[in-house]
Amino acid sequence: MFTAAGAFGTVPSAYPGTLISNILAGTPLLASTAPFSSDHPSSGMLNGILANARHSMLEMLDKTLALVSVSEQWIKEIPNVPTTEREVAQCAAFQKQALISCRMALENSRLANNAFMNSNGCAREEINRFESEIALLKNRVLSVETQYDQEINQARSPQFAMFQNLGLGLPTDGTKIDELKALRDSEIVNLRNQIVKRTQDLQTINQSMTNLGLWVELCERAGGYLGSIYNILTAIGYSNDTDAVAFKELMGVQWDQIHKEAEEVKSFLQ
């Protein structure tokens, strides 16, 4: 999306259709104000960071739409290089508004990108922590099994080995052994439930990492695009010193496409 070429270089695609489709089809990371449920470890921290990213994304999109609005009005009223004082004055007014909106959109794309990168770093730390916890829990299961097996063997009578060798009944403290087995099974079930929960948390974070990468790419592309537009706006010049090539470059930007795709991303965030 957002393609225009000219003397100031090719304006890169900001929101390619495939990128938007991948974001919308993935984990709905920013579709709500609290994507991580309260029972998820570190949900407060992650939700807080993503809330900042979401706010900055909405601000960037709003300012981008404001840039589109003023630019479309500009093109409608003055489609060619200004030649009269009245047209020059109008261009200067449009240019001022466009520069303000573009600058603010750029700043918010930077803030959103920083927030996404911060969230990405936190997510990586969470992945390492979950993987470590899962490994420790699995080792704990083995340790508990070994510990209780030893205690169960110790609960058997001293004649256990002799009776076992003779193939006779095993004199044991059955009640104590049953209690030990019950405790062992209960503790192991609890540990395995924790492993299942941590594994689910790990899967959620891994899915989020993929989605975060797409949002980072979106911010970087949007920032690059807005930067190119900003350069064109400043290259146009001021007052009577209008650069015809830069002016033509601005007129060639696909503002209707920008509007469509910015609204599409914005609707997903609201």
Image (spheres, grey):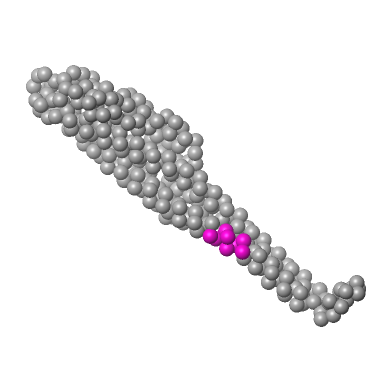
Residue 160 placement (x, y as % from top left): 84, 77
In the rendered image, residue 21 lying in the magenta stretch gets the answer no
Q: Which residues are magenta?
A: 132-139
Residue 230 placement (x, y as % from top left): 23, 34
| Total residue callouts | 0
Quadrant where the C terminus sits is top left
Query: At 49% across and 56% down in the image, what residue appears?
Result: 128
Query: At 74% across and 68% down in the image, what residue appears?
Result: 181
31 or 116: nearer the eye?
A: 116
Query: At 73% across and 67% down in the image, what residue appears?
Result: 182
66 or 207: nearer the eye?
A: 207
The extreme bottom residue here reads 158
Quadrant where the N terminus sits is top left
Query: At 63% across and 58% down in the image, what residue appears?
Result: 193
In the shown orientation, is residue 120 left or right of residue 157? Answer: left
Residue 150 placement (x, y as % from top left): 72, 73
Q: Quadrant of residue 63?
A: top left
In the shown orientation, is residue 213 left or right of residue 192? Answer: left
Q: Is residue 175 above or below residue 219?
A: below
In the shown orientation, is residue 242 left or right of residue 176? Answer: left
Residue 72 seen from this side: no
Residue 167 seen from this side: yes
